[in-house]
Amino acid sequence: MIKYYPEDQQDYGFIGIKFPTNGNTAGSNGGFFNMSGTTEEQAVTNYINLLLTKKGERYMQPEFGIGIQYKLFEPNTLENRTDIEFEIRRQSAKWLPYIINHRIEVREQANLAGLAADPENAFHIVITFSVTEAGANKQITFFQNSGRVDYLVS
């Protein structure tokens, strides 16, 4: 099977809209929306979109999504942590085959400093992945923060 990925060159315009979508954020292109100029940027946004979309939320694709923001507030049990990891692997393989998950950690305690208001009862998710076989490793960390879910991409 031959895979084709377009060249990442800014000369051809923009590929899509990045998260956060607000164009007034730092690093935006100065337009109304925060646009991605490379396939890697757009792939990361697509992955975040898959992780944050709740099943049944996307019109005509009721099986799309994980709804991670709801799962982080479920009871902190081994069964729930295992289910989250399984769903991330299953959904990303189905909807985003160009994302290669290297490691998915659903940590039972939010032990990273400053990432959770309740480190004893909270848990967080760290996903290490790359876009295509040649892409550099990226990491997304989802965590509870004062009753809401935040994420960091590095």
Image: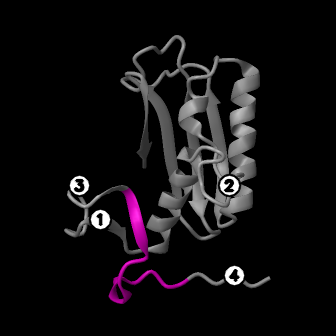
Q: Residue at x 50, y 59 (%)?
A: 44
Q: Nearer the viewer, mark 4 or mark 3?
A: 3
Earlier-in-chain disc, 4 versus 2: 4
Q: Is residue 34 left or right of residue 99?
A: left
The quadrant where residue 115 appears: top left
Secondary element at tag 3: loop
Q: Residue at x 24, y 69 (%)?
A: 29
Which amino acid is tagged 2? Ser
The region drawn magenta spans 6-19
Q: Is residue 57 left or right of residue 9?
A: right
Q: Nearer the viewer, mark 4 or mark 1?
A: 1
Categorize mark 3 by other alpha carbons within 10 Å: few (<14), some (14-19), many (20+): few
Cβ–Cβ below 8 Å for labels 3 and 2?
A: no
Would you name the residue on which mark 3 appears? 25
Q: From mark 3 to mark 1, how far is it between C-alphas?
A: 9 Å
Earlier-in-chain disc, 4 versus 3: 4
Task: Please tell me whether residue 10 belongs to the stretch shown in magenta.
Answer: yes
Secondary element at tag 2: helix
Would you name the residue on which mark 1 appears? 33
Q: Is residue 39 left or right of residue 65?
A: left
Q: From mark 4 to mark 3, how far is it between C-alphas?
A: 34 Å
Residue 101 drawn above or below residue 32: above
Place of residue 80 in the rendered image (x, y in percent of width and height, measured from the top left):
71, 25
Q: From mark 4 to mark 1, how far is it between C-alphas?
A: 30 Å
